[in-house]
Image (cartoon, grey):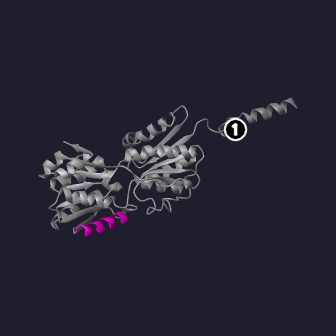
C-alpha cells in the first residue's frame, strides 16, 4: 500500500502534471504586422496603459510578441503559434493581423487595434454589438478620407485634378476608395486613380497621374504602400506633387501632410479592454470604439522643396509642424 501511495504521489507531481497547472500570471499574446523595432515603439502606449492599471511585465503579466516584419503571408502561422500558447487575450495590430487571429481561434478573446473598417473587413458584424471573441479599436471614421481630401485641396487650392494611389487587393480598401470618389464629387474635383500592387508599380502610377493632369495626390494606406513609404515620398517630391498621407510616420519621413487618428491614444485605450477581459468581461459585450483624437501633421521643409506655400489656415489647424 505505501508503494502504491508513493507512486500516485510521484504521478501527481510529474512534470506533465505540473505543466497543466494554471499560470501564475496572465499571458497576453501580441500579433502585429509591424517590424519588431516599429512594434516596440508603437506598442509602448499599450504597455504604459497596462502599467497605469497596475500590470507590470514579469510581475503580474507576461507578453508573447509575434511580429510579421511586414510580411503579411507569415501572419497565419504566427497566429497559430500564439494560439498554441493559450494566452488569456490576443492583441492584434492591423487588419490582416486581426483576421489571422480570428481564423486561428474562436475562443480566445481578441482585442484589435489600427483597423480601418472592422465591419467591412468581416471582423465583427456590428460596432455596437461585435459578438464572438473579437472587439477593439478602429482608426477610421466615415468621413476621415473625405476630410483628408478636403485638407489637401485647402493646402493646394489650385488643384482641380487629384490623384489617388491605392492597392485594390488590400482588405477593406474598397469602401475607403468609394469614400474618396464620393468626396471628390462633392468637392467638384476630378479624381485620377492609379492602382499599385507591387514596388514596380509606383513610378508608372505617378507618371500616369501626372500625364492626366493631377496636381495633388491622396495616398491610401496598405501594407505594400507602408513597406515602401520612403520610396513613394521620394517620387512625390521629385514629381513636385503635394501628397496627403494616412499616417504621421510618412510626414516624419519627408511626406508633405498627414491627417489620421491618434494611434498612440487608441492603442493606449486598448489596455483598458484587456483589463476588462482579464477581470471577466466578454469581447462580445464590449463595443468597438472609434477614434476620438486626430492629428494633422505638416512638413514645411517638404513644402519648400515642392515650391508650395502652405496657407495660414492649415498651419493654424496643424497639431504639429515639422520645420
Q: Which residues are magenta?
A: 174-187
Q: Is 106 contained in the magenta span?
A: no
Magenta: main secondary structure: helix
In this view, which residue lies farthest toward the right? 1
Q: Nearer the viewer, residue 313 or 306?
A: 313
Query: Residue 14, can we see it?
Result: yes
Residue tagged 1: 17
All told, the count of numbered labels is 1
Query: Residue 87, can we see it?
Result: no
- Judge whether 318 appears above or below 40 on screen: below
Question: Residue 254, percent across and down?
Answer: 22, 47
Q: Find residue 151 and report its image quarter.
A: bottom left
- Judge whether 24 appears above or below 160 on screen: above
Question: Residue 248, percent across and down?
Answer: 29, 48
Q: Left or right of 33: which side holds 156?
A: left
- State which quarter of the image contains the N terminus: top right
Question: Residue 7, percent across and down?
Answer: 79, 33
Q: Nearer the viewer, residue 99 or 224?
A: 99
Q: Nearer the viewer, residue 12 or 121?
A: 121
Q: Is 175 contained in the magenta span?
A: yes
- Judge whether 167 appears above or below 35 on screen: below
Mark 1 neighbour density, 10 Å: few (under 14) some (14–19) many (20 or more): few
Residue drawn at the location 35% of the way across and 63% of the way down:
176
- State which quarter of the image contains the C terminus: top left
In this view, which residue lies farthest toward the left? 307
Label 1 element class: helix
Amino acid at each position: 500500500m505505501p508503494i502504491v501511495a508513493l507512486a500516485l504521489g510521484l504521478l501527481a507531481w510529474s512534470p506533465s502534471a505540473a505543466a497543466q497547472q494554471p499560470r501564475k500570471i496572465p499571458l497576453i499574446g501580441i500579433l502585429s504586422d509591424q517590424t519588431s523595432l516599429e512594434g516596440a515603439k508603437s506598442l509602448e502606449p499599450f504597455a504604459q496603459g497596462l502599467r497605469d492599471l497596475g500590470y507590470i511585465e514579469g510581475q503580474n503579466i507576461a507578453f508573447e510578441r509575434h511580429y510579421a516584419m511586414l510580411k503579411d503571408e507569415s501572419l497565419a502561422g504566427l497566429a497559430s503559434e500564439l494560439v498554441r500558447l493559450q494566452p488569456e487575450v490576443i492583441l492584434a495590430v492591423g487588419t490582416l493581423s486581426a483576421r489571422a487571429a480570428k481564423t486561428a481561434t474562436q475562443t480566445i478573446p481578441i482585442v484589435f487595434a489600427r483597423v480601418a473598417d472592422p465591419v467591412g473587413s468581416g471582423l465583427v458584424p456590428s460596432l455596437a454589438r461585435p459578438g464572438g471573441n473579437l472587439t477593439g479599436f478602429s482608426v477610421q471614421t466615415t468621413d476621415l478620407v473625405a476630410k483628408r481630401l478636403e485638407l489637401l485641396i485647402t493646402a493646394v487650392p489650385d488643384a482641380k485634378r487629384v490623384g489617388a494611389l491605392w492597392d485594390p487587393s488590400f482588405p477593406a480598401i474598397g469602401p475607403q476608395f468609394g469614400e474618396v470618389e464620393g468626396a471628390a464629387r462633392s468637392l467638384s474635383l476630378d479624381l485620377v486613380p492609379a492602382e499599385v500592387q507591387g514596388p514596380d508599380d509606383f513610378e508608372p502610377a505617378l507618371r500616369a497621374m501626372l500625364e492626366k493632369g493631377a496636381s495633388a495626390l491622396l495616398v491610401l494606406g496598405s501594407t505594400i504602400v507602408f513597406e515602401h513609404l520612403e520610396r513613394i515620398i521620394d517620387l512625390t517630391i521629385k514629381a513636385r506633387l503635394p501628397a496627403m498621407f494616412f499616417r504621421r510616420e510618412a510626414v516624419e519621413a519627408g511626406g508633405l501632410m498627414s491627417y489620421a487618428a491618434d494611434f498612440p491614444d487608441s492603442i493606449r485605450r486598448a489596455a483598458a479592454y484587456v483589463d476588462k477581459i482579464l477581470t471577466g468581461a466578454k469581447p462580445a459585450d464590449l463595443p468597438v470604439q472609434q477614434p476620438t483624437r486626430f492629428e494633422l501633421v505638416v512638413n514645411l521643409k517638404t513644402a519648400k522643396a515642392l515650391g508650395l506655400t502652405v496657407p495660414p489656415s492649415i498651419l493654424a489647424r496643424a497639431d504639429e509642424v515639422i520645420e
